[in-house]
Image: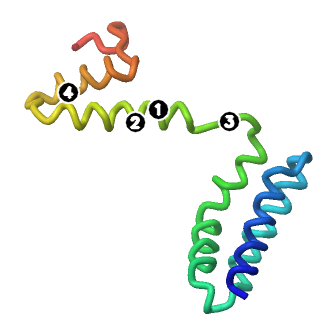
Amino acid sequence: MQVECTWGIYQRMISAYRHPDRAAGRVEMSSVIDALADSVPEALVELRKLGRTLTRRACDVLAHFDRPRTSNGPTEAVNGRLEHLRGLALGFRNLTNYIARALLETGGFRLHLHPEL
């Protein structure tokens, strides 16, 4: 029962994201979020947790259907570089040097934007 219910929700979500009409996909995803928020049995703890998360983040989830071809990939790339730098920069004692190194690592160092550096 639990696996079937979880599989059904999963299939509805995939169907919403793959729907050729974005408006219809948005409506379908919105109905999935509503269903997870309202009618999940107590025994399905993980689905209830997913429902709370999707309800809280509904605007972000549904934005996929409103803004086609957008991605957080560039942000994740910069964050990955900064995490790598943080691991390498354990010896930095000067915050200004750390900021300058972070800007160099992420390709965001522009002298005209930071005249004090």
45 or 115: nearer the viewer: 45
Residue under circle 2?
80
Marker disc for residue 102: none
Q: Classify residue 29 as left or right of residue 50.
A: right
Kind of residue at disc 3 = Thr
Kind of residue at disc 4 = Tyr
Query: Which image quadrant for residue 42?
Result: bottom right
**Judging from the image, what secondary structure is the residue with disc 1 in?**
helix
Residue under circle 4?
98
Marker disc for residue 70: 3
C-alpha distance separating marks 3 and 4? 31 Å
C-alpha distance separating marks 4 and 2? 16 Å
Q: Earlier in the sequence, mark 4 or mark 2?
A: 2
Location of residue 66 with respect to 82 vertically, above or below: below
Q: Residue at x 90, y 46 (%)?
A: 20
The label nearer to you, 1 versus 3, is: 1
Residue 47: give x, y in percent of width and height: 63, 77
C-alpha distance separating marks 1 and 4? 18 Å
**Judging from the image, what secondary structure is the residue with disc 2 in?**
helix
Q: Residues within 10 Å of mark 2 (few under 14, many from 20)?
A: few
Residue under circle 1?
77
C-alpha distance separating marks 3 and 2? 19 Å
C-alpha distance separating marks 1 and 3? 15 Å
Residue 18: give x, y in percent of width and height: 83, 50
Residue 66: give x, y in percent of width and height: 77, 44
Quadrant for the C terminus, please: top left
Kind of residue at disc 1 = Ala
